[in-house]
Amino acid sequence: MTPPAPSGPVVLLGCGRLGSAIVEGWLKTGAVDPSDLIILTPSAKPVAEQARARGTRINPPQDELEAARVLVLAVKPAMWRTALAPLIARLGPRTQLVSVMAGVSAADMSEVSARPVARVMPTTAVAQARGVAAVWSADPGALETARDLFSPMADVVDLETEGQIDAATAVAGSAPAFIYAFVQALADAGRAEGLSMEAARRLARGALRSAGAGVETDEALEALVARIASPGGTTRAGLDAMSASGDLERAATAAVTAAVQRARAF
């Protein structure tokens, strides 16, 4: 028999870019009822005000935190101890922690809070319920809580070890920016071949949407490439040029490696 889902509010500590995206995803999917959400933020945020209009509590008295079933840490990694410390004594004994911060180990958070911790690395596309989220925890209960919070708005990928978190952050969390940068480079290359700025940007963005539609099929990436790159065609010529130069592989490796190293330096 499946045990009942834990009750109590979800507390979000921090409502910056990622925190706001998470709130948008919860509001869109109903993964967290607005009336069950508490947002702690030092400054006004548009999405927090949208949530407030639907029943969310913003910066309520701290004694209201005692009933929380989970506290989601979404502050900047350098600030987490300062932000979390005043709340520890206010949380109830069953409150779990879910962190979406890069570079802060579960052991450090557990030591400070004396609570089970799950780590989640989501992309900001959770706002549109189209994200992906890497999840890890040594605690089965915290892991299940993290899955419940993010699976309605993301493809949840379980990691085998916490050590894989930084690589997952680079491959998924940071990679959309890498991909946008490559699409911008394609637009610039189109302009160099005579396209207007507007035409080059619209075509490059359209290509990105087309690529995203292909990924939604869950077909292997190699198969998606082969579907477009017919032998002797223009696409194959472009791919061969990238392969011969080695720039694509070197750029991808350099970007992921640098992102991993920065995460480990927090």
Image (cartoon, rainbow, N blue to C red):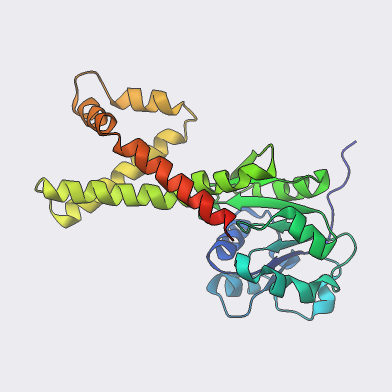
Residue beneath the point at 26% across and 33% down: 242
Q: Which residue lies at the image location 52% right of the left edge and 51% below the top edge?
A: 261
Q: Residue at x 60, y 51 (%)?
A: 121
Query: Which residue: 84% across, 69% down?
Result: 91
Q: Is residue 127 left or right of residue 143?
A: left
Residue placed farthest to the left in the image?
A: 194
Note whether residue 75 is visible.
no
Answer with left or right where residue 255 lies relative to residue 80. Answer: left
Indicate the position of residue 80 as horizontal and vertical percent values. Answer: 67, 68
Location of residue 157 with respect to 8 vertically, above or below? above
Residue 75 quadrant: bottom right
Q: Where does the image place residue 186, in percent across and percent down from the top left?
A: 24, 46
Toward which corner of the image does residue 240 lie, by quadrant?
A: top left
x, y percentage for residue 97? 76, 58
**In the drawing, does residue 167 fall left or right of residue 199?**
right
Which residue reaches farthest top? 231
Task: Point out residue 176 in the picture as x, y percentages from the top left corner.
Answer: 43, 49
Number of marks: 0
- 58 to 126, vertically: above or below: below
Quarter of the image with the C terminus is bottom right
Q: Locate the N terminus by quadrant.
A: top right
Q: Can residue 85 be spotted in the picture?
A: yes
135 vs 106, nearest the viewer: 106
